[in-house]
Amino acid sequence: MANDFTPGTIYLEDLEIGMSRSLSKVITDKDIEMFAEVSTDHNPVHLDADYAAKTMFKGRIAHGMLSAGLISAVIGEQLPGHGTIYLGQSLKFLAPVRPGDEVVAEVKVVAIDHARRRVTLETTCSVGDTTVIKGEALVLAPSRN
């Protein structure tokens, strides 16, 4: 995982519309196998090359929620960071992620409700120039007060 940042917190009082953070990770066979074990999702499109070759994807793909989990990592580690509480997340899966793909997860502040400590974030995951997931998160941001 590319970690060109110091994990921590950007407090509500310091957040600004347009702020963004991201991370990248190459999705490996081991990642897919471990996610299958943790989630108990053993769909053969993720794990069985022969089965997956006969699907519309023509090969194995990663679990969508594995890539979406990278969004959670950005939110929990960078923006807003430690102490952030997820309130909701919408996701649209637009394209498959395959073993060996480098996924870039990005989070961008689009609205701030200071009175309620709520922050709306645009969330995306991309592989190269292809957006594979897009959505929106609502979080409760940590505050100094």
Image (spheres, helix red, strand yellow):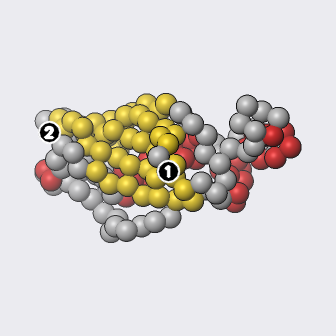
The residue that mark 1 highlights is 128
Mark 2: which secondary structure? loop
Residue 27 percent across, percent down from the top left: 60, 56
Mark 1: which secondary structure? loop
Q: Amino acid at mark 2?
A: His
Residue at image position (13%, 50%) is: 13
Q: Residue 78, labelled with which disc?
A: none
Q: Residue 114, labelled with which disc?
A: 2
Q: Is residue 31 above or below residue 94?
A: below
Which numbered mark, 2 or 1, is in the foreground of this view?
1
- Out of 49 and 70, give the one closest to the viewer: 49
Q: Amino acid at mark 1?
A: Gly
Give the mark nearer the N terminus: 2 vs 1: 2
Residue at image position (21%, 36%) is: 111
Alpha carbons under labels 2 and 1: distance apart = 35 Å
Q: Is residue 8 above or below residue 59?
A: below
Residue 96 percent across, percent down from the top left: 61, 40
Q: Quadrant of residue 17?
A: top left
Residue 63 percent across, percent down from the top left: 64, 42
